[in-house]
DNA sequence: GAAGATTACTTGAAACTTCAACTATTAGCC
DNA sequence: GGCTAATAGTTGAAGTTTCAAGTAATCTTC
């Protein structure tokens, strides 16, 4: 913190921040609700979607955790639950005996294939359809910039 | 669902959606991390901030839950925790004996007053500073529109 | 003014997430 | 080879959130 910035947000900043944070919360809420029909949360959806696109529909736990943006511990717990649901199986990794594969079952594949179009439609209806093509392009640029900024911040902290 | 829309996202849509969702997740993560220095989560911060601005620094549980966007049950549990931390007290409501007031203590007020500038600075550094004034204005418009769209959806579902 | 519905809030249990600790294995290094 | 450090993943406990059910008070309506 440089101390140069004013302490509070001006009206323009406040409007941007509140519009973003409130709409985001409600959007996520709505998307989660839509997914409930398929007995899935967004993080679980992400895990299964990634797994379904991996070669052989299997992936090492660490890689899956990273790509689906969940902690290793959390993934491990979730996979245990999904195993009980019969969507995934764990398989020992012979190349690296510390590791294990998360392997999607046929049942798991059917589940994600069934959920995906509804989820996409939900994202479309609640988010993309509110934005013009140009809006979408601008938004992608802005949020990529924010993400890059976060990485910079991280570098400075580390 | 009308069935008219294509099943998958095109490249522009995908870029917008992924940029938004990934940056948002990382942004929230970063903001939460920044708040940890003050032993606060974002929802807890929101609760305390709202309470600190209420007349008499007290608010009825229901109203506080609504304005801070948390469920009543969750608020009740959180207030129990905050009571133990000495930040808030519950007070019986005489006008409506079913109800109760959440009352911010002096200690709670000091905690939020201490956290607020850091949090604002964190929002600034990680979000607002990445955007030009014009960007901020555009963003506010877009996300207000998304929020309005969600309300429409809700009306159609209810 | 009493029965029934609604509202305000709390509670306990179940499910979920986080955190730190742990095992097992592999990699790096002299 | 043998020692230490790092990596892959799991686990159990503690804390958090959700959900359904509960209590108590107020409102409605006839």
Image (tube, coloured by chain):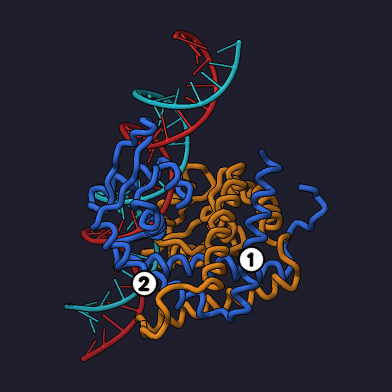
Chain colours: A orange, B blue, C red, D cyan
Task: Give coordinates of residue A67: x percent, y percent.
Answer: 51, 66
- In this figure, which residue is indicated by the disc labeled 2? B117
Above or below: residue A146 compared with residue A38:
below
- In this figure, which residue is indicated by the disc labeled 1? B17
Q: Chain letter of disc 2?
A: B
Task: Give coordinates of residue A26: x percent, y percent.
Answer: 56, 53
Let me know if marks 1 and 2 both belong to one chain.
Answer: yes
Q: Are the two marked residues, 1 and 2, in contact with CB atoms closer than 8 angstroms?
A: no
Decide which of A109, B46 is in the foreground and name it. Answer: B46
Task: Give coordinates of residue A52: x percent, y percent.
Answer: 60, 58
Res. A116 in view? no
Between disc 1 and disc 2, the foreground one is 2
Q: Residue at x 36, y 64 (%)?
A: A98
Q: Residue at x 58, y 59 (%)?
A: A23
| Label 2 crowd (10 A; few <14 / some 14-19 / many >=20) | some
Res. A12 in view? yes
Q: Does residue B85 appear left or right of residue A27 in this picture? A: left
């Amino acid at each position: 913190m440089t101390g140069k910035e004013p302490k509070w947000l001006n009206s323009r900043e406040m409007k941007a921040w509140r519009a973003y944070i409130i709409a985001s919360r409600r959007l996520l809420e709505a998307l989660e609700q839509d997914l409930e029909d398929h007995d899935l949360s967004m993080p679980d959806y992400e895990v299964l979607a990634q797994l379904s696109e991996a070669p052989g529909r299997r992936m090492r736990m660490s890689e899956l955790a990273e790509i689906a943006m969940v902690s290793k511990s959390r993934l491990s717990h979730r996979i245990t639950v999904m195993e009980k649901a019969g969507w995934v199986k764990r398989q020992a990794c012979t190349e690296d005996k510390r590791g294990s594969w998360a392997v999607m079952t046929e049942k798991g594949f059917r589940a994600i294939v069934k959920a995906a179009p509804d989820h996409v439609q939900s994202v479309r209806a609640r988010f993309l359809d509110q934005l013009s093509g140009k809006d979408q392009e601008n938004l992608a640029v802005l949020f990529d910039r924010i993400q890059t900024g976060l990485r910079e911040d991280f570098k400075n902290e580390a």
